[in-house]
Amino acid sequence: MALLNENYLKLKAGYLFPEIGRRTATFAEANPEASIIKMGIGDVVRGVPRPVIEAMKQACEELAHDESFQGYPPAQGHDFLLESIAEHEFGSRGVAVATDEIFLSDGAKCDSANIQEIFAIDQIVALTDPVYPVYCDSNVMAGRTGEADHAGRYEGLVYLPCTAENGFSPALPETHVDLIYLCSPNNPTGAVMSKQVLASWVEYARREQAIIIFDSAYEAYISDPEIPHSIYEIDGAREVAIEMRSYSKTAAFTGVRCAFTVVPRQLLGSTLNGDDISLHDLWSRRQSTKYNGVSYPVQKGAAACYGPEGKAAIRDLVGFYMANAALMKKELTAAGYTVYGGDNAPYLWIVCPAGNDSWGFFDVLLQQAHVVSTPGAGFGSAGEGYVRLSAFQQRDRVHEALERIRRL
Amino acid sequence: MALLNENYLKLKAGYLFPEIGRRTATFAEANPEASIIKMGIGDVVRGVPRPVIEAMKQACEELAHDESFQGYPPAQGHDFLLESIAEHEFGSRGVAVATDEIFLSDGAKCDSANIQEIFAIDQIVALTDPVYPVYCDSNVMAGRTGEADHAGRYEGLVYLPCTAENGFSPALPETHVDLIYLCSPNNPTGAVMSKQVLASWVEYARREQAIIIFDSAYEAYISDPEIPHSIYEIDGAREVAIEMRSYSKTAAFTGVRCAFTVVPRQLLGSTLNGDDISLHDLWSRRQSTKYNGVSYPVQKGAAACYGPEGKAAIRDLVGFYMANAALMKKELTAAGYTVYGGDNAPYLWIVCPAGNDSWGFFDVLLQQAHVVSTPGAGFGSAGEGYVRLSAFQQRDRVHEALERIRRL
């Protein structure tokens, strides 16, 4: 019989979010009268902005006519969108990113899962703990780890604990690592990396000749003007960093699907023989072989995010969710909870009340408050003792959830 | 410096289609007055059918409103589309495929590149020669091969030549293989596998406990009622085959992006220890970890393909391109060319005139007839001496291209 990739069998349980979905569905089935408020998976709830919708509809109409039909997209994306990204996401912050350094995709999740493919299998990977599970699982599936221990930590990975004691800002690795996944604003802790902290990572990567995979899918949620939105705001980052962005949490594209990854031309990897090779070329080869581009109406919709009306609508959306976050942080704190995050990120990282572990408090919230959270332990062993609440809800549901949690 | 995946360096030249694009662009730049007719890459040229467009627009409008907003899609796809696929693609042909065996994706190219991930790295892969390059390159990138020889054949792969002598129907492997990629109607040769031939492959796979990866992206182009559209029309195929389909060449979705892969529940792989594991579960884990689903408006558009108006429009589109194929085959044959394919597939597989190899005749067609073809050698060493012409063009362009080729 055909042999399977046994690395998959090392994975602990299911991917986190399907597991939460299963528990929630089981509860809902047993309690059909319960009005469940979902603040777990981090999906948005408000509609896609009108200028984006109109651009998508117009693009659909273009597809209907032979004269304006669009077939296979250019490999990295249509110029109209790549140029807007270069200008509005980077140029406007004084960061030079060329259009041919931008690779569109259908999700930052996909890119962050796929990026490890272009590196050698024996490279040492550093992950924060807690961490977005995709960074970890994709490396497990590729065979870059051994088995997991009882705490769910895979042999061979370097874990960088993010705890209340270090302000959820991990210390630099004490040993050499080759690949480092960083996420700021952070999913799940809601912490952000200051310019100084990010600079220390760039310096580490330059010194160790390591590559930073920087996930800034939540950069639009930064309110503090001192916090960098792009790692390329740090001098020297272009030689050591790949950056990922997404439209999911800005233009409400969780169901529309668009994201992009920046791979600077300067970025090099090495062969065993010591030859330097462009990682941009490798990623280009990976994408042109295994991917076929983003849907045309979606690219048109994403481009509409950069017009004056699109920008204003996205500011409103982000502002709405961040007002939720502020409300949640204030009221939960007043109710006696210890709450982190929520200032520059749509996630609150909440200490479980004494006597509860993550999944235990997840169950309390689900069964007694009918609120779906995400258990911190699902993000790694240092997430034990926390749950994550997302600010992606309608205001009345947030009020209702807070009221129910207060009554616990 | 971070070490890269050196398997990528084994790949010969660029991926075929970017290379064709580069040569075409160079010619166009040097000859700005030339009216180039593209019959190379296999992209469609006619608009997306109206019922599909209207469904997509309506879905966009739904996304604009909080009440009808759609966020992250269900992992395998929305039920409305999965149910339509099960009924209209399979049920209508007497084939039972359950909705939870269908995995939507953004392209059959992506799925056919990714599917190898769930198998062990030492599995023996059989490919037809010529072959759609993605099947080969994805296995090279994964490390399942050694280096390529001077003919571009990678060490470790089992090549199954498809030649005029065997009617472009490969013989069964003489040795054991674990994974077999089959494509019918075939890209690039335009050949189709009869029920009897396909049954012999299923029998081989059952005997050798191998897995067939069956790409039927072009099944809508089958005109002969005796040719199977799905491998599951063959008894016993559910235990040995994965099947891939696409909307690219039916609903003109090359720029819209939607496809699906069927992994039957019965399909098993094995661990080294001899434990049987569901390949459905492994693929589900792969997709839920590394993928995030198809855009909602795209899923709605795909579903509209199955209404009476959608079906009629797709029949018209396919009929139009197949009339092109018939015209091309007739006229090129009359002009003295030896032409294969084109009867049950939108591709013609044309013997290069004496004294021309594939890339040589590609250049003749480009430079003298201003027609872009695809050199057969780009699909493998047994493709040397052929070019592929696609029937995906407007009728007047087809006439013009044929006229120019006749004048050569």
Image (cartoon, coloured by chain):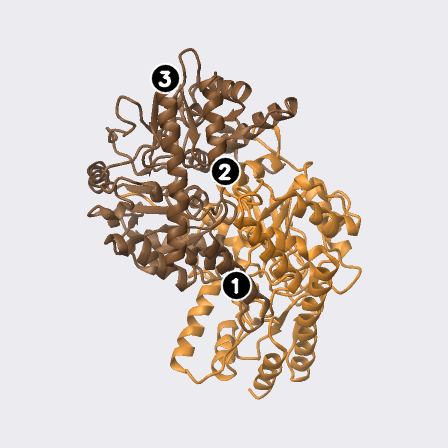
Chain colours: A brown, B orange
- SS under mark 3: loop
Residue B289 — which label?
A: 2
- The residue mark sitting in front, 1 or 2, is 1
Which quadrant would the C terminus of chain B be assigned to in this image? bottom right
The percent coordinates of residue B292 (x first, y second) are 51, 43
Residue at 49% from the left image edge and 72% from the top image edge: B359
Instruction: Measure the alpha-carbon separation of dots 1 and 2.
Output: 33 Å
Chain holding disc 2: B
The percent coordinates of residue B27 (x first, y second) are 42, 78
Q: Which residue is mark 1?
A: A58
Residue B339 — which label?
A: none
Observer-nearest residue: B362 or A118?
A: A118
Q: What amino acid is found at the position of numbered circle 2 in the picture?
A: Thr
Q: What amino acid is found at the position of numbered circle 1 in the picture?
A: Gln
Q: Are marks 2 and 3 on the same chain?
A: no
Residue at 53% from the left image edge and 18% from the top image edge: A368
Label 1 CA crowd tier, 10 Å (few <14, some 14–19, many 20+) = some
Observer-nearest residue: A378 or A336?
A: A336
Q: Left of B388 or right of it: where is A252? A: left
Residue A23 higher or lower than A4, as above or below = above
Q: What amino acid is found at the position of numbered circle 3 in the picture?
A: Gly
Q: Are marks 2 and 3 in contact (CB under 8 Å)?
A: no
